[in-house]
Image (spheres, rainbow, N blue to C red):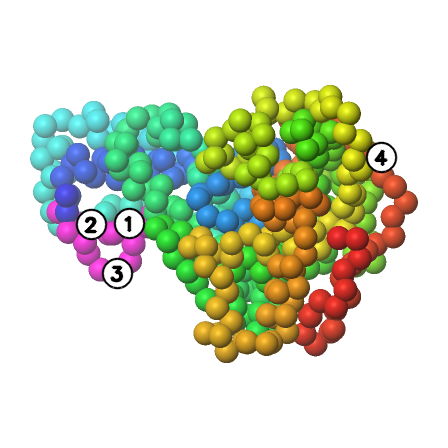
Amino acid sequence: MGNSVGNKPIGLLFKRNNLINLRIKDFVQELHIYLFELTIVYKSIMHLKKRKLTSFDSLVGDRKCQTRTAMILSLLYKKSFVEDELVVVEDQIEQLLQKTKSYIEQIAGYSHFELQTLTKNLLKFSLLDYFNSYNLNYDLSNNLKLASLCFLTAMSKEELKQLCSQKISSNKLDRLLVSSKITLCNLSIKYEQELAKIYGCINEQKVLAKVETKSFCSMTATLPNIKHILKKAKKENQVLLKKIIKFCVCGGAKLKNIKSFIVHHGEFIQKSIEQVNKDKVVMVIEGYQYPGSFKQLKERLGISKEATSIPLHFHRICMCSNNGQLELVDDIENAVIASLTQHPQFTTSIDINFEELALENSCVQEEYNYYKKLSGFSREDMSRFFVTHIYPSTVKEVLESDKEFMIEPPKALKPKSIRVQPATGLATSLKNA
């Protein structure tokens, strides 16, 4: 195919070696890959501008949906990104798309003599040389790289094949996807560690410095990163939407509802969703409530053991005579922290090794143990609120896509929150989580 030259890689989303001695066929393939990258970036910009945020719900095989959501929301809460960067980059990417298409078409129409000249030049000049000479090279910001990678990994293999016009082989596309997932994991970890420097203590920073890897996934501990994400959300006055399906012991759905939470005096409190701007960018938190385990619910409904959610066609209305009271969960912040703490902390399903981190009996470990012991928030006990997924959206997008959900009117609530010791963040009490 060619030889690598120097250390500087090329590519917007898939970093590739700068090659020399390329055959024309391989050179054109590289141009098609670049065209594919540009198309992904351009479509990402279009979806961001139109607030079609479920297109960025990237499930890449790890447990970082909350981190990806926080990153996308933070971008869209930046006025400079929405009003300046997107507008400028959209025009630049559109021009690059046209240039790259034109160059590919130009090569397809080359005469025999022109093809011979190109073959000789490919022996002397590298891929980067060609990109620079045709003004195709572009330095994509980390903001748009993140959004584009989320957009890319949210699409199916068939959708991606159509997007690259079948010009990239299936095997090559698989390799590019793995490359993008690795990059996305690394960007997410960097974001978590930066948040820890702003919102966390030294010991929490130590916990997040530990990275476990399985296949293409790299993973940091879920706690304390979810704490920092929610702290940032409160600082930016973000809105949370909680979508919950409450299942009866019989397996029927007793209630489906969506509640909105706004920031008031530094705490998340419930507010009527009708009073929230429909174009508001929100963090959607989905979950189940059931008097038992996720495994038991799936068995009750006859669903595959491997299923990670309850498919819509299994959501039958509860018709039984069981009148058991369903517990209300209004302290959204601590419910989410408890549920994510009770998830396996790493992709490898190991626990946080506090001894290895020299954090035995530290306040971080005490807080971790505290949340681990709270009942009702885990896969094994879903009696209060088991979080199944977190993703970015808008109020309008959620309401239009989930019309089967009933929306409960808000109640007069006082903010309920965990009381902490300022120096350590150690949980000392939790009221009605």
Mark carried by residue 409: 4
What mark, if any, has residue 7 been given in the picture? 3
Indicate which disc, 4 or 2, sits on the residue closer to the N terminus: 2
Labels 2, 1: front one: 1
User: Magenta part of the protein: which range?
Assistant: 3-21
**Label 2, on which residue?**
19
SS at badge 4 = loop
* Amino acid type at image mark 1: Arg
Regarding residue 118, the answer to whether it shows in the image is: yes
Comparing 190 with 313, the one in front is 313
- Camera-nearest label, 1 or 4: 4
Q: Which mark is residue 16?
A: 1
Contact between labelled residues 1 and 2, with CB atoms less than 8 Å apart: yes
The answer to whether residue 79 shows anywhere in this view is: no
User: Could you say whether the residue bearing mark 2 is in a helix, strand or loop?
Assistant: strand
**350 left or right of 67 in image:** left
